[in-house]
Amino acid sequence: MPKREELSKSIYSLLTIAYIVALPTSSLCQEVNNWTFSVIPADGQISGSPGSTIGWGFQMTNNSPTQWLFASDVTSSNLFAHGIETNLPFTRPVLAPGTSTLVPYNGLNGLISLTWDADAPIGFTNVGVFEVEAQWYDGNPDDLANPGNYIGDAGTRQSPYTATVSSPVPYEPSTGLLIGIGAFALIGLYLFVRRLFSKFGSVHLHD
């Protein structure tokens, strides 16, 4: 009996230790699924003419009530043909617990920018998936005075994209330019008529 009781106590102690060790891992596993990422536009579809630069924005949400999220990198699943892509617009955001960020592409900031080759064929399409990698911190990792500590990997999120080479948009004069041209033409016509009447008037007086 004593040996059995000692064995039971030993098993109970081992189970207790295993449970305590597993708690942080279990909590971290739950946190891995506690954030979202999507591209802007929502359907991931953009287009531009040969030689133009286009791009995607992004939206991210940190649903963790306690941990900070650092989005460290973004990659694309496929190499872009007939163009050059870069993730320089990606700001590598840090999201406080329970916050979101929305960054439309504006030429400087966003997710990924793509510059089509000047001879990119009209109608060509690049299709793939963007993947964002992130990590968890117990505070703001960008705080120089008191930076947060790394807790663990937050996993990755994916969002599909499509980029198409479109036909160049025909040049259309702006409304202001058309108004200016019309006004200039009217002034010219007025001066011509005035000069014409002035000439005929002078001839009539001599008669």
Image: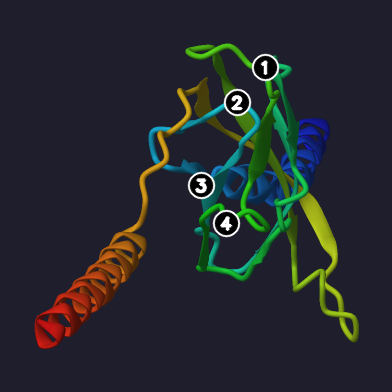
Q: Position of residue 173 (x, y in %)?
A: 37, 51
- Mark 1 or mark 4: name the one nearer the start of the chain: 4
Nearer mark to the viewer, of 2 and 4: 2
Q: CA distance from mark 2 to mark 4?
A: 19 Å
Dot 1 or dot 3, earlier in sequence: 3
Q: Amino acid at mark 4?
A: Asn
Q: Residues within 10 Å of mark 4 (few under 14, many from 20)?
A: few
The quarter of the image holding the N terminus is: top right
Residues at discs 2 and 1 in contact (Cβ within 8 Å): yes
Tag 1: residue type?
Asp
Q: Dot 3 lies on which element?
A: strand
Instruction: Provide the residue designation for mark 4.
Output: 106
Which residue is the site of mark 2?
Answer: 50
Q: Which mark is residue 119?
A: 1
Q: Quadrant of residue 140?
A: bottom right
**Marked residue nearer the N-terminal end (2 or 4):** 2
